[in-house]
Image: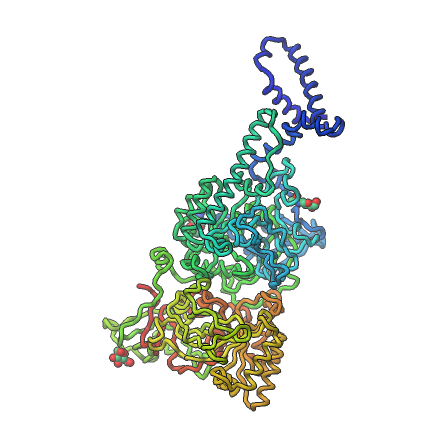
Amino acid sequence: MASKRELEEFREFLQVHDNPPKFRYITKATRRAWLISCISVWLFIYFVYANQQLWLPSGDIFKNKHHHNHPSDPTAVLKRCRALEAKVELPSDFVNRKRSDRFEEGTRPILVQNARIWTGRKNGTHVFKGDVLLDKGLIKSIGYLSGGSLVEVYGTSLRVVNADGAWVTPGIVDVHSHIGVESAPYLKGAADGNSYHGIIQPWLRSLDGLNTHDLSYPLSIAGGVTTALVLPGSANAIGGQGFVMKIRETGEKSPSSMLLEPPYQINTSFPNPNLPSRWRHIKHACGENPSRVYQGTRMDTMWELRQAYNKAKQIKEKQDSYCSRAFARDWHDLGEFPEALDWEALVDVLRGKTKVNVHCYEAVDFDGIVRLSNEFKFPIAAFHHAAEAYLVPDLLKKTYGKTPAVALFATFSRYKREAYRASEFAPRILAESGIRVTMKSDHPSAIDSRYLSYEAQQAYFYGLPENLAIASITSQPAEVLGMGHRIGYIKEGYDADIVIWDSHPLALGATPTEVFIDGIPQLERAFVVEKPSNYQRRPPVPNFDKDAENAVVYEGLPPLQPRRSEAGSTVVFQNVGTMFQQRNGVVEQIQIAQGEGSGMIVTRNGTIICSDQCANLFDIGDANTKVINLDGGSISPGFVSYGSPLGLEHIKLEPSTNDGTIIDPLSRQVPKILGDFSIIRATDGLQFASRDALLAYRVGVTSAVTAPVSTGFYGGLSVAFSTGASHKLEKGAIIQEVTAVHIALNRQNKYSVSTQFAALRRLLQDPSEGEAGVWYKKVISGEIPLVAAVDSADIMATLIILKKEIELRNGKQIRLTITGGAEAHLLAKELAEANIGVLLPSKPFPMSWEGRRILPGPPISPRTALTELIENGVSVGILSQGSWEARNLPFDVTRAAIDSGGKLKKEEAFALGSTNVQRLLGVQIDEATVDLVATKGGDILSSSSRVAAILSPVREAVFFMDNN
Ligand SMILES: *[C@@H]1O[C@H](CO)[C@@H](O)[C@H](O)[C@H]1NC(C)=O
Ligand SMILES: *[C@@H]1O[C@H](CO)[C@@H](O)[C@H](O)[C@H]1NC(C)=O
Ligand SMILES: *[C@@H]1O[C@H](CO)[C@@H](O)[C@H](O)[C@H]1NC(C)=O
């Protein structure tokens, strides 16, 4: 039986094929009779036509004669043609849904009472104190809900959580992730992030590589992440389709069941046109990556993109003209619908149904993509990484359709040329230009998404307003994904994805105490540390208006060299709240006179000459005297960076800006000219005044220890230097020429771990040969430390045994330091007994198999690796893994101290980033002359302070950071 719709179609069909004026000259009755018989005839023909395969002779000759130029199923064709035009929109009954499509049977209803709820409403400014009820995978209601009356409704199945005034936000939405496709730990068998089979591959799908067993899932959830857009990598100009997924495990345990509102195309190339369209996502990349992978240039990449879009456009036009003939019932010789399985995703971009996410950094690249979008008339959902976006907001606004959002890192920069002009002020500048800002992870290779809230915290610190900073990881990314109707906000009827926090979400170290995805609690048992009550409030932040302005004025390269005080001048610090000093290898607080409520410190040529009763030492009116009010801030020893090639590189991926890699004699032939046992000194390759070094200096990381860059077993000799110096010959530039001997033992080496140990044993047993012998002799006599980069507990255990063996032979203690130390906590006691210190990264992540057994810390484990080691008596410091990260050391130390739950005294926290690092790396300095950091609005560990000046007795000056 033909449906009403089909009859209507036939009516239209008839109208087009007959001559309508005829009807005017015949009576109504004949007309009706004529019409009915006509319809019957046409119905008969249609029926025959549509079913001929079933009951007509099906010889090829017959088919070709009557069939080959006509669509086999005109009704289906018309449906499909209509579906092509349909826009992506919500099914009308969506807002009234009573149960989530993702609801898992047996999930208990949950009432979160007494919460401070960031709803996302009113531009992210709406915070409601009350209760939230979660049921059937949805946020059922928000308000003042009495547990008692709900128990009447739900019975004992209702779980009541008293949030006790805690902050509650929507689950974090990560707009750029490779979770599950780039595996953690990294294993070749699950490296599915990039295809290298072509620069244009819109047909690929990240879903096809989605590993459900990744170690990242529980860790990211522990950081509050609930949803991620999983994109292919950026090797290709068009790398393939991305998929939005909730990162919890499902009952079905399949990748597909993790997807959120997946497009129907995942099951069938051309889905039932009656189904509503759903958003699709595609990844594009421009700039350096496709150029590198395909040995091309930006010109090649843009041409490839234009060709691809031209192809898609041609297919779209073919379909459109096909459809306009179909709508006109012009079936003659129409043929079949022009399908293109390989290009259909790109055609859907042109139809406005696929959100385009472009990895793109520079003005030149935005320009190309903006022109592309206008040439082929498609919008861009977001520019990702977008290091220069803040310099060209007007260009972004020229994109076809809506202005794209910008997805950023907070401080991850300068790792490649196109990221060189990135600015920590970009989020605020873009927001001020009216552009949607989201912070993103690029998990796992860039930022661990567990720390996405940290990205928002830093964006906030550097000036992104509170409402937008929280929105930048919740509602804004949800909107970018086209999912703002169900995630990213706390509203009735939204998915029950919420996070309860142990502090204000923008307070450094904020940690979830509960995470719900689809109403399902994700933290089996959350370990929560004590935090002071002021952590519940919006953290005050310094003013960076001038710095943000300069970032734009200088097009991303504002001068970073601080202003130096005049020789012989006096600098007076007033209102000094606290003062810390380095003495006998530890940091201690010293009392400062608080006469008339204000501590005062007087310096000359960078040296403190008075800290008590100083008023008679200077004359405020004197032109040679500068007075700085620290507003209760602090003076404390500078931090020491270690762990990256800071000082040996400007731009990681640009060899011509770097010192390069040393030769590992274990895996490669050493050129004759070096002799058999040479050892490389980092000091010889130092480059001063890199932006990473100066940025570090400006936040109080006044020195760094750097070892030569090695990709193998054999390291070299590290150097300690001033991050503020302009060149090596400047007084105080080199703090210590050689501090320690470095090696690395791991399973990425060309030769086995046992071979690496054989080499090390030889170097330690018989250190007589060459220049290396000189330094290894110092190692076995305990004069300088041996620093071993090791993650595996098994390798550490062997090292402990070898150390004992060598010590027994020589009767002297070896000073051994482990760096990296992902699994060091497993041997905390043994490391303490062997007197081995450890330098740890601030954010543990199971990047490699040999380092996968991390101790994650709250909320997953009560202790962090750091507190576990300290409690066992191991000397510990914090390292930075990339040069760009050196400037985050004060934040990282603060976070480590917060995570310890108050177990660390302030002095001990300082030591993590200063004295411990020096001692473990063999830096011996005259403590009376270390650089001191003067901070305004709190001490260096306060997230509301900023550095005002650095006092350098060695460089004989005070350096001012205010840029005035
Ligand atoms: C949203 O908030 C930001 C920052 O607080 C503000 O600059 C902007 O004007 C607000 N937008 C709207 C539409 O209210
Ligand atoms: C795909 O097919 C599976 C199995 O039939 C079904 O469970 C799922 O809901 C389908 N998904 C979509 C988006 O059509
Ligand atoms: C400070 O430096 C100037 C110029 O180098 C020198 O003349 C003066 O003696 C120094 N003063 C102190 C107190 O060291």
The structure residue drawn at horizontal position 63% and vertical position 39%, both measured from the top left corner, is 270
Location of residue 600 in the rendering, given as x and y in whole percent from the top left corner: 34, 75
Residue found farthest to the bottom: 811
Q: Is residue 748 left or right of residue 296?
A: right
Q: Is residue 262 left or right of residue 432?
A: right
Instruction: Name the one closer to the observer, 403 or 296.
Output: 296
The structure residue drawn at horizontal position 56% and vertical position 86%, both measured from the top left corner, is 765
Instruction: Name the one closer to the observer, 894 or 147.
Output: 894
Instruction: Name the one closer to the observer, 152 or 43.
Output: 43
Residue 658: name its quadrant.
bottom left
Residue 813: name its quadrant.
bottom right
Location of residue 947 in the rendering, given as x and y in whole percent from the top left corner: 39, 68
In what quadrant does ligand 3 lie? Answer: bottom left
The answer to whether residue 326 shows anywhere in this view is: yes
Residue 63: name its quadrant.
top right
Q: Is residue 304 left or right of residue 524?
A: left
The answer to whether residue 135 shows anywhere in this view is: no
**Figure colour scheme:** rainbow
Q: Which corner quadrant holds the N terminus?
A: top right
The vertical placement of 840 against 463, above or below, is: below
The vertical placement of 193 against 707, above or below, is: above
Q: Which corner quadrant holds the C terminus?
A: bottom left
